[in-house]
Image (cartoon, rainbow, N blue to C red):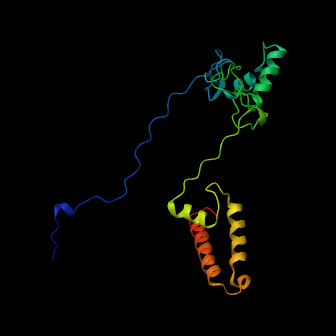
Amino acid sequence: MQRATHSRYKKDIRIKPDRAAPPPPSARACARPDCIKEGTHRVPKSRDDLNEHLWFCLEHARAHNESWDYFRGMSEDEIDAFREAAITGHRPTWPLGKRSARPRNGRGPYEFDDGYGVFGDAAEKPRPRPPERRLTGMQERALEVLNLDPTATLLQIKARYKELVKRFHPDANGGDRGAEERLKQVIKAYGVLRASGLT
């Protein structure tokens, strides 16, 4: 009994042979007029335009490279300048701290306005003010409990906390309830400052 087949299942799934490769490009003739060989090796056309090339056969490419002198026609000073520029990849350079897009404060075009005194004498420049701290109400009250100004530093806050803990500790006050209550306030205030990142 033959099985019925539908045309939609008849697909050719065999691996097909590769298509014919495209023909190779036409051979490039050697740039030497008297040579009939193929130009397979490229060489720079001139020092002024290194992106333009000539195509030579191997024999004439070797001859060209042996006679090629990049510095032909350059003076000793031009060669020295080229060597110095080659150290930085022929990119412009300037001394550290001496570059500026435009003159500032009437200085020359290649001087840098060092506002923070990193490269020069910091005494002639005013020092930038530290950013002012913005405090919440809880932080202000916590600083008041510790008897500190809003500008108190981290070290001042820690030193005052240690001082007050020693002063109001029950062992130092003979069990005085007032000192114990004051100690709780100090510990709570320090906890608020610590949670807010001020300590």
Q: Is residue 56 above or below residue 12?
A: above
In the image shown, does 47 or 22 lie closer to the viewer?
Answer: 47
Image side of residue 84 versus residue 53, left or right: right
Q: Residue at x 75, y 38 (%)?
A: 118
Q: Is residue 20 above or below residue 79?
A: below
The answer to which quarter of the image holds residue 54 is top right
Q: Residue at x 68, y 77 (%)?
A: 168
Image side of residue 69 versus residue 130, left or right: right
In the image shown, does 98 or 91 lie closer to the viewer?
Answer: 98
Quarter the N terminus occupies: bottom left
In the image shown, does 139 or 105 lie closer to the viewer?
Answer: 139
Q: Indicate the position of residue 177 as horizontal and vertical percent values.
A: 62, 84
Q: Indicate the position of residue 103 as horizontal and vertical percent values.
A: 66, 21
Quarter the C terminus occupies: bottom right
Q: Indicate the position of residue 141 as horizontal and vertical percent values.
A: 55, 64
Image side of residue 68 versus residue 25, left or right: right
Q: Residue at x 67, y 25 (%)?
A: 43
